[in-house]
Image: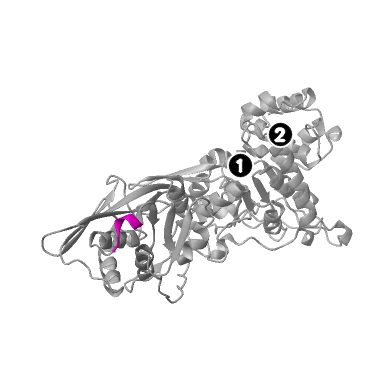
Amino acid sequence: MPLAQTWSVALVGLEGHLVEVEADIAQGLPKTTLIGLPDASLSEARDRVRAAVVNSGERFPDRKVTIGLSPATLPKTGSHYDVAIACALLAAAGVIEVGSMRQTAIIGELGLDGRIREVRGALAMTLAAARSSFERIIVPELNAGEARLVPGIAVYGMRSLRQVIAMLRGAEIPDEAPPRAEPRLLSESLTRVPEVDLDDVIGQREGRRAIEAAAAGGHHLYLHGPPGSGKTMLAERLAGLMPDLSTDDSLEVSAVHSLAGLLTSDAELVVRPPFIAPHHTASLSSLVGGGSGMPRPGAISCAHRGILFIDEAPEMHPLTLDTLRQPLESGYIEVHRSAAVAKFPARFMLVLAANPCPCGLAGTTNGICTCTPQILARYQQRISGPIKDRIDIQRQILPAARGVDDRERSESTATVAQRVSCARDRQAFRYRHLGWTLNSEVPGSVLRREFALDAASQEVLEDLYSAGRITARGFDRVVRLAWTLADLQSLDRPTVELTHQAFQLRTGEPLTDFADSRPLKGTPA
């Protein structure tokens, strides 16, 4: 049979597209042509497939061979088409029956000796094949664990091309040496969730209150204060307060991590909210995603449904930090490149930590700041106003007073996490018919229409808005935060005291009782 076909999957972002791999063997001088917009790594498949076929004990056709990848207008990138190309070629040569490959998707990179190497994005590719009603998929053995997370499709993990040929022939599958995992291009420590407990923190009542509220409602957080005051310590304990991911969120986050090369063979499913902490020198493309050719997910997508922690935030390039504006509002990022436009999920909690000035002593009681007013202003402006306006909670973290009694130790992570879980359950129940699960996700128009505050709370916020102390966006964010504080206290709706406390948390003012605050009417802007 001179013509045969197999199926593989192309990824544009996390969206999978089925690719038909056709092989045609015709009379003519020996030559292998690959068509269908392949990139450089895919064009080299001709040589990899030839060597793998020969070293697997099969004969490579000494005629004119044409390999077509359809749809031809879709750019193809990566080496995961190798096994599908080899199978189509062998089927055209009569080595494999075409019928044995019906309803079968094939992915995997070939080594010159016929070994099948692991690839990135196997989970997302398997999801695409399952949605296209394929009955089975052949993947590298090292990717089989993550591929089996997808229901409704049979997954076959293979070590070599010889095993694939035997399986498609219906013969006994030969034994092969176990595959060797490839080195990770991205450090696995990037997604390491710190194993620390909140009861390590002494004092810091307002800081603990801030991270509890942030975890309960999914609110963005900005911690600022002198070096050594505990900003990073609090931020690292925030991840432990959040509950496990739902099944759907786990699959979505795992698919992103698979494409980014962060999944390991012993932990295919991401069940905990990821904690991503890029260095402040990170480039723009490493943060939002990109790269040459087909775009890859960046740190904000790897932090999807988890935490993106940027320590020393003013030291990050302002333009890089400002690229977070759009995903903070929309929950996704579109990366435009010449080859394709990729859309990645990016609904994360942003946590920023910063010193108040270059010397770190501005606004503290135990030190004298040596920075001039101009230096201080420039440093604080490195985090732009639009970014700060999108942050729900701002807290100044000062060093704990000396001689703090052990009774001032905070509650444990388990105790606070239980409160956070109950608050999230209340939110999920309240929005069960609207499609949202957290207060931070609900649009302001829906809050004002369906979940309006009481008259007294509404009057407090309107006075603050009239006085210029909050923006229109800040108005809605205070309302969301007030609902979160009410959920933490198991109240049916926010009180005027909680609404005022939400305003204080947002603006960074010290937490006081509403009765102790001055009247807001007539306050100058």
User: Helix, strand or loop at disc 1?
Assistant: helix
Foreground of the two, 233 or 435: 435
Foreground of the two, 471 or 109: 109
Measuring 19% from the left and 66% from the top, which residue is drawn there? 61
- Vertical position of residue 438 compared to residue 35: above or below: above
On the image, numbered disc 1 is attached to which residue? Answer: 388
Mark before the other along the chain sequence, 1 or 2: 1
Foreground of the two, 229 or 138: 138
- Vertical position of residue 33 compared to residue 161: above or below: above
Q: Is residue 195 left or right of residue 401?
A: left
Measuring 79% from the left and 24% from the top, which residue is drawn there? 456
Question: Which marked residue is nearer to the observer: mark 1 or mark 2?
Answer: 2
Residue 14 in sight in this render: no
Residue 152 in sight in this render: yes
Instruction: Give the image quarter of residue 202.
Output: bottom right
- Vertical position of residue 510 compared to residue 265: above or below: above
Highlighted range, magenta: 96-100
Foreground of the two, 446 or 360: 446
User: Which numbered circle lies on residue 104?
Assistant: none
Q: Where, quadrant-wise, is the C terminus in this rendering?
A: top right
Residue 98 on the magenta span: yes
Instruction: Give the amino acid at mark 1.
Output: Lys
Instruction: Give the image quarter of residue 467.
Output: top right
Q: Residue 206, how many percent across, how many down?
A: 78, 48
Q: Main secondary structure of the magenta part?
A: helix
Q: Residue 231, how many percent across, how many down?
A: 69, 56
On the image, numbered disc 2 is attached to which residue? Answer: 430
Residue 459 on the magenta span: no
The answer for how far apart the CA atoms under marks 1 and 2 are is: 28 Å
